[in-house]
Amino acid sequence: MTATTAYRRGDGCRPSEVQTVEDIYQLLWTAVVNKRPIHGVYSDRDRWFCPHRLGRNHRGQLRVLCYQYAGQSDSGLQAAGSPANWRCIAVEKLSRVELLEGLWHTAPNHSGPQTCVTEVDVDAED
């Protein structure tokens, strides 16, 4: 076990990596470039989403513009493909992030919530 490994209790002992913001950013970057879905916890809710744009907002804070296709949300989820499922997520508030295999989810109006990421590091459309 490394210094960055912790253990969770529940359905037995399983190793669980302690993720830094840098670790999470790298997973998001990989997901954007390779158009792969992500699972993570945000605002104490499980979320499955596809990150489309990663960078910083106008205050210099790390943000990811993503399409949430499953899980929970304070505002609720609409039907698959609905433009109402776009989310702007603060990277530092994500935890237990994992890169998934699976279908890429998106919807029209990808550029609509542009105030989310004003300084783009990577975009799935590039």
Image (cartoon, rainbow, N blue to C red):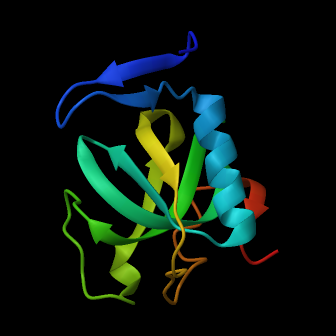
From the viewer's perspective, tell me whether residue 3 is left or right of residue 95.
right
Q: Which residue lies furthest to the right in this view?
A: 126
Looking at the image, is 9 positioned above or below residue 82? Answer: above
In the figure, 18 relative to 36: above or below?
Answer: above
Camera-side residue of 1 and 69: 1
The x and y percentages for residue 42 are 34, 45
Q: In percent of the image, x 51 and y 90: which residue is there? A: 108
Foreground residue, 69 or 8?
A: 8
Image coords of residue 101 (percent x, y): 54, 70
- Residue positioned 46% across, 50% down in the render: 89
Residue sitting at 56 percent across and 54 percent down? 64
Image coords of residue 9 (percent x, y): 21, 25
Identify the image quadrant of residue 41.
top left
Q: Position of residue 51 (x, y in %)?
A: 57, 64
| Count of numbered circles on the image | 0
Residue closest to the eye, 13 or 17: 13
Q: Residue at x 26, y 88 (%)?
A: 79
| Residue 97 seen in the figure | yes
In which quadrant is the C terminus drawn? bottom right
Q: In this view, does 119 lie above or below 124?
A: above
